[in-house]
Image (spheres, rainbow, N blue to C red):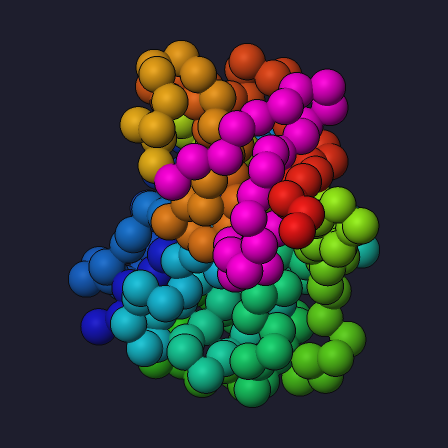
Amino acid sequence: MAPIVLLTDFGGQDHYVGVLKGVILSLHPQAQIVDLSHEIPAYQVTAVPFLLEQSLPYFPQGTIFLVIVDPGVGGTRRPIALQTSQGYAVGPDNGVFTPLLPHVTEAVVLDHRTYWRTRQPSQTFHGRDIFAPVAAHLSLGVPLSHLGGTIRPETLVRSAPSPCLPTPQGWQGIIQYCDHFGNLITTIPGDAIRARAIQQVQWGDAVIPWGQCYGDVPAGHLLALVGSHGYVEIACHQGSAARILGAKIGDQVNIICQTS
């Protein structure tokens, strides 16, 4: 039985995540539900593709990704479900599924109300009334084509490409995600810089030394390195780089390489 993987910005304070699970279990009591994360910064659609990209390879064939970061809920954005070479995805058509789009084999807009929790959904909680029940029906074997009308994959909304640009001195990117530890993960792939000796990383006026692991600097000190995700990150050994630098998603980062 393939799992239903939840990825939202709902946080842990309120009842929203529990309600999603209740709706799914009411339809499919044996469903396997995995909480990938509910701590995406509120409304931060651009943070979702990184987490999906990092997580997809580790789930079995047929997995259903239920993704709800939906600042446009109730508006003109489409509720959709996708089938890919690996499994399925359910959520808003607002760019959250960008890493999946090259692998989409079928896409539908969720307009068959038979598979909703109610034919008159709340305009502020489509997660409860549309997306969660659709995910449950998929997990029960309902074909994607039963859930709504077919849409062309090329019409699906894509997030802007993650900037990673060569410069005369090295590379320029932005911070694409900040994790629980305050590590600032950039859009600069480690493979882009491995062939060149790194001199330093700059964020604003801060000059940050390069390292191979967190322990290369004393506790409380900043460094930059390639993380387990494969991107250059700015970290603080046993501390939060995000808090020290006051950095946020979208801030510019520069890598300065040594010249021969």
Residue found 22% across the figure and 72% down from its top: 1
Q: Residue furthest front?
A: 260
Picture coordinates of residue 132, whole percent (x, y): 45, 56
In the rendered view, does 169 fall on the left or right side of 206?
Answer: right
Rendering quarter of residue 238? top left
Picture coordinates of residue 101, whole percent (x, y): 61, 73
Q: Kindly tell me whether residue 154 is visible in this rendering.
A: yes
Using the image, determine if residue 259 lies above or below residue 221: below
Q: Is residue 192 magenta?
A: yes
Using the image, determine if residue 48 lies above or below residue 159: above
Q: Residue furthest left?
A: 30
In the rendered view, does 112 fall on the left or right side of 216?
Answer: right
Residue found 48% across the figure and 28% down from its top: 223
Q: Is residue 36 magenta?
A: no
Using the image, determine if residue 217 lies above or below residue 250: above
Picture coordinates of residue 8, whole percent (x, y): 49, 43
Q: Kindly tell me whether residue 50 is visible in this rendering.
A: no
Q: Report the span colored magenta.
A: 188-212
Picture coordinates of residue 204, whole percent (x, y): 73, 23
